Image (tube, grey):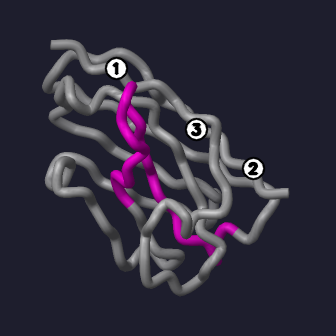
């Protein structure tokens, strides 16, 4: 059974930074595409960043491009989202998700098979 556990959320002032981590167990992490989603109250869950199994290709939402960085360590079965220059609009629950496709060609929510429980990120103004 594949399990994903997020950590690193918290409260930070605007302009600050946070690093979120996702630990994956019970599966072949090296074959998974990985993504970070977020969901703010009253809004749809949206893809923030994604990374292929190899770590070579990445995707970023326009709203976070240049501020967030996704990375993975296949030896440790972890994926990280480094968030810099945080804004109040970044406030949301952040979810780690895994795509069982080794060679992904899309990053829609339905493409991800496994999900973590989420971690709260709150950015104060």
Q: Indicate left or right for 125 with 119 as reference.
A: left
Checking the image for residue 122, the label placed there is 1
Q: Residue at x 63, y 50 (%)?
A: 115
Q: Quadrant of residue 112?
A: bottom right
Q: Whole-percent x and y of residue 111?
A: 55, 69
Residue hosting label 2: 3
In the foreground, 16 or 115 = 115
Q: Residue furthest front?
A: 42
Label pair 1/2, CB-CB below 8 angstroms? no
* 95 on left or right of 42: right
Alpha carbon distance from label 2 to label 3: 10 Å
Chain part drawn in magenta: 29-49
Image quadrant holding the N terminus, namely bottom right
Chain-order first, disc 3 or disc 1? 3
User: Label 3's element?
Assistant: strand
Query: Which residue is depicted at the point 67% across and 56% down?
Result: 114
Note whether 5 is above or below 40 in the view shown.
Answer: below
Q: Secondary structure at mark 2?
A: strand
Left or right, 35 with reference to 43: right
> What percent of the width, then of the height, locates residue 46?
38, 49
Queried whether the magenta region covers residue 43, the answer comes back as: yes
In screen coordinates, is 125 left or right of 94? left
Q: Are marks 2 and 3 in contact (CB under 8 Å)?
A: no
Towards the viewer: 34 or 62? 62
């Amino acid at each position: 059974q594949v399990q994903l556990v997020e950590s690193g959320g918290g409260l930070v002032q605007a302009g600050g930074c946070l690093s979120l981590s996702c630990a994956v167990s019970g599966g072949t992490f090296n074959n998974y595409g990985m993504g970070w989603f977020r969901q703010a109250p009253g809004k749809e869950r949206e893809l923030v960043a994604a990374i292929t199994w190899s770590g070579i290709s990445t995707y970023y939402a326009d709203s976070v491009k240049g501020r967030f960085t996704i990375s993975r360590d296949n030896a440790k079965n972890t994926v990280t989202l480094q968030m810099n220059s945080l804004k109040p609009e970044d406030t949301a629950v952040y979810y780690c998700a895994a795509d069982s496709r080794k060679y992904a060609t899309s990053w829609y929510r339905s493409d991800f098979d496994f999900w973590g429980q989420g971690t709260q990120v709150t950015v104060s103004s």
